[in-house]
Image (tube, rainbow, N blue to C red):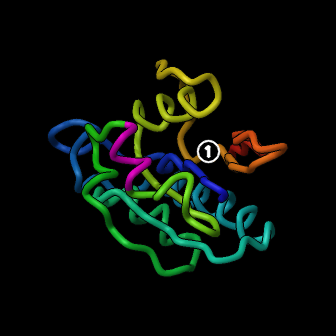
Amino acid sequence: MDLILWRHAEAAEGTSGIADNKCKLTARGKKQAQQVAEWLKAQRLTKVRVLSSPAERAQQTAHALGLPYKVKAQLAVGADTVDLLAAAEWPDYHGAVILVSHQPVLGRLAALLLSGQEADWTIKRASIWWFSNRVRRDETQTVLRAVVSP
């Protein structure tokens, strides 16, 4: 399984602060999302499922990929790592899952996947962290395949 954590691109601050679900991407954010989407398309992933937070900025980021995506409340601001792993069906899904969500949960999930413990790691806006799950010699391994920023 491939699991790609994609933090939403730069967004304008809303009236209730950046946690506002109605915040839209800035012009720079749209460009960031498009740059990362182009890189993702070039990877020729198979059996791709794209899941987005209900926040407008996350949906706009997911939309840049040009693939159908599903909005999942489990990826909203305030989600936890258990929510994200359940939504992605990690590590059992056969194919690639792209989760478009927010900090700090994406950073916490990256830390959990690499170190076995949650920690407050930073994932920059519009960046992706690409993980693979595989079995070698009867041992399950999590591999960091790429970290890409616009």
Q: Quadrant of the N terminus?
A: bottom right
Residue placed under numbered mark 1 in the picture? 127
Badge 1 crowding class, 10 Å Cα cut-off, few under 14, some 14 to 19, many 20 or more, is many
The number of numbered badges drawn on the structure is 1
Amino acid carrying label 1: it is Ser
At mark 1, the secondary structure is loop
Q: Magenta residues? A: 81-86
Q: Residue furthest front?
A: 138
Residue 88 at x, y = what percent?
A: 46, 57
Q: Residue furthest right?
A: 137
In this rendering, position of residue 137 left or right of residue 83: right
**Which is more toward the observer, 105 or 148?**
105
Residue in the image at 56% along x and 48% along y: 5
Residue in the image at 72% along x and 45% along y: 148
Residue 13 at x, y = what percent?
A: 30, 41
Residue in the image at 48% along x and 18% along y: 119
Q: Is residue 83 magenta?
A: yes
**Image height of 107 relative to 64, above or below:** above
Residue in the image at 46% along x and 58% along y: 89
